[in-house]
Amino acid sequence: MTKREPQNPERVVSVRFMPFDVSARVRAGTNLLEAVRSAGLPLKTSCGGEGSCGECLVQVVNGRAGGSYETRPSVALSSELAGKGYILACITTITGDLTVDLPHFEELYIRSVAAFTLSDDEATTLSGSTEVGPVVSRVELQVPPATLEDNYSDLTRLEIELRKATGAERFTAGYPALVRLAAAVRQDNGRVSATLFGAGPVRDVLDLRPARSAGPIHGIACDIGTTTIAVSLVNLETGDVVNTVMGLNRQLKCGEDIISRINYASRPGGLAELRGLVVGTINTLIGKTIDGQAVRGPGRSDRGISGEDIIYASVSGNTTMAHLLLGVDPRYIREEPYVPTFNRLPYLRAADLDLAINPEARVYCAPAVGSYVGGDITAGLLATPMLIDSERVSMFIDAGTNGELVVGNRDWLMTCACSAGPAFEGGGVRCGMPATTGAIERVSVTEGGDLEYKVIDDAKPRGVCGSGLVDLLAELLVGGYIDRQGKIKAEAAGERFVELEDGAGFLVERAEMTHWGRELVITERDITNLIRTKGAVFSACSLLLKQVGLTFDKVDAFYIAGGFGHYLNIENSIRIGLLPDLERDRFHYLGNTSLLGAYMILISDENRKMVEDFSKNMTYVELNTEPSYMNEYTGSLFLPHTDLDLFPSIKKLL
């Protein structure tokens, strides 16, 4: 009689998480929140999994209660939302195959025309060139067949024709090209398409195909932000942007700023996890740019593009993000003397970084200047006029999670960075969210005291994004609802004053008027975080100017980049003390300069050379070692500042 092994009674089920399109295999009975976290997705809860905060809200896309999951009611989940299939992950158990959507983390889509279509006048204001001349190229050749008399190897015959076509002296062929060589030169009557890397006497053969099966070569420009990551798919032969997609950096589950990411990397397995999260985010976005197909799949997208056609990548990001992309320990970035492992890198292979494009594709990372001024700034300067202007003094401000600043012109550049925090990108603020559907992006208070706002896509409000938070803080200050320290005046706020477990708050919108069926409230703690963020940026600007003997009034132009969105209100930014009180026409919003700079490097090797040259000559100021910075920062922790004489136009309003 055959002895049977006992069967495992625990079933394994599949859970799919949208919009990330990530799946996980878990045992039946697993808590849904635990499953989300095991998949490396950034879903949080502040109630310890008790189902009372409502932050881990998800929507069931495919599955049913009692069959795919079991959950229970919660006061944090309205009956209206429950009727639409929403559940709280922390109080839900998975019992079968399930697909859920994480609505707080909807990916953001940016039209390529908004990011890269420049008029002739706009192109002349850029330091970088818009002429197409990438470091990779495609050439078509006629390779003659071998004969008994002319019996050179296939590789030798290919090299002869390559020398004729390019003028280069020597070629090296990678393994994938060698594998394809024999078939390529014998199909299509010897007509071959070769993709080459380099512009000097030595070229690398990255890809080789019969000419009839070869399409245009493509590249990706990638901005790796602490909060969001953006990817553009670009035709390298024309410079045209095929598609641009932006989504949240999945590393958010490990911390909202770079210091928390560095700390997380020191945990056992933390560095590998962080690297996997950022690479996974980038690969998902690459797939989205080519119509959502899996880029390593055998087929092509509707556009006729596959991952094999992506042969070059230009990446920009702060110094910490670059280290995490490569899986390099970033701990020394925050330890005195604050020295990173690298500032500049050689070209890398896509296969070594696990990027889902052609394995032989070359990857260029924009150079950093110091521990906290990275490739997002050096690449971003290409999108400003600062490098072509030797007369005027300008200041470049990238007010993202890690605020970076540059002052100078073509002849000299000085830079520093401050830990601004994620408040103006929706992090660390109770009602904060990214600038996507449902975000309040503009706020004003009428003479009658009513709060008016504009919501992205005219949807029911889900939260307030960075530009809306700037407006809200300014309107509460000028309207007399908060004092200069950010404390809410209960009498002035009236019915909008609310008492919460974590302190006083100001009601932005009633529960029945919001998407989630919960009140939108900004708390005094939130306001404190916003004041700290604006204070960090302003004080860093002030100190950087003092380092070169300048004051704000000597700066001819301020170029503002970062995650605020195109609706940043300059007047309100000055009212809260984020920007100096100067003529408003000195301020110019440039959008995502990091992505635009990465794109410019992608399409033009001259731009890459320019970035390499000026980044070597930038003077980096480490604020961690500047004793006067704390005095500057402390003075900025009021609205708009402790010294109201610095803000004469605002002083009149208070």
Image: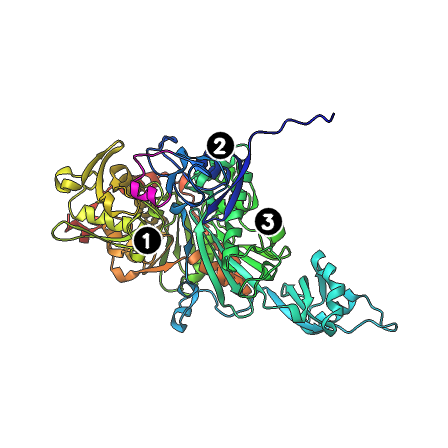
Q: Residue at x 68, y 27 (%)?
A: 4
| Magenta region includes residue 90 | no
Q: Which mark is residue 29?
A: 2
According to the picture, the residue beneath numbered tag 3 turns out to be: 354
State the CA–CA distance, disc 3 to disc 1. 46 Å
Viewer can see residue 19: yes
The answer to whether 315 appears left or right of 7 in the picture is left
* Nearer to us in this view, 497 or 49: 49
Which region of the structure is painted magenta? 72-85
The amino acid beneath tag 1 is Leu
The amino acid beneath tag 2 is Gly
The x and y percentages for residue 402 are: 40, 46
Q: Residue furthest right?
A: 148
| Secondary structure of the residue carrying numbered label 1 | loop
Q: Quadrant of residue 203?
A: bottom right
Q: Which mark is residue 550?
A: 1
| Image marks 2 and 3: residues in contact by CB distance under 8 Å | no
Q: Quadrant of residue 216?
A: bottom right
The amino acid beneath tag 3 is Asp
Q: Residue at x 50, y 38 (%)?
A: 96
Mark found first going from the N terminus, 2 or 3? 2
Q: What's the image's color scheme?
A: rainbow
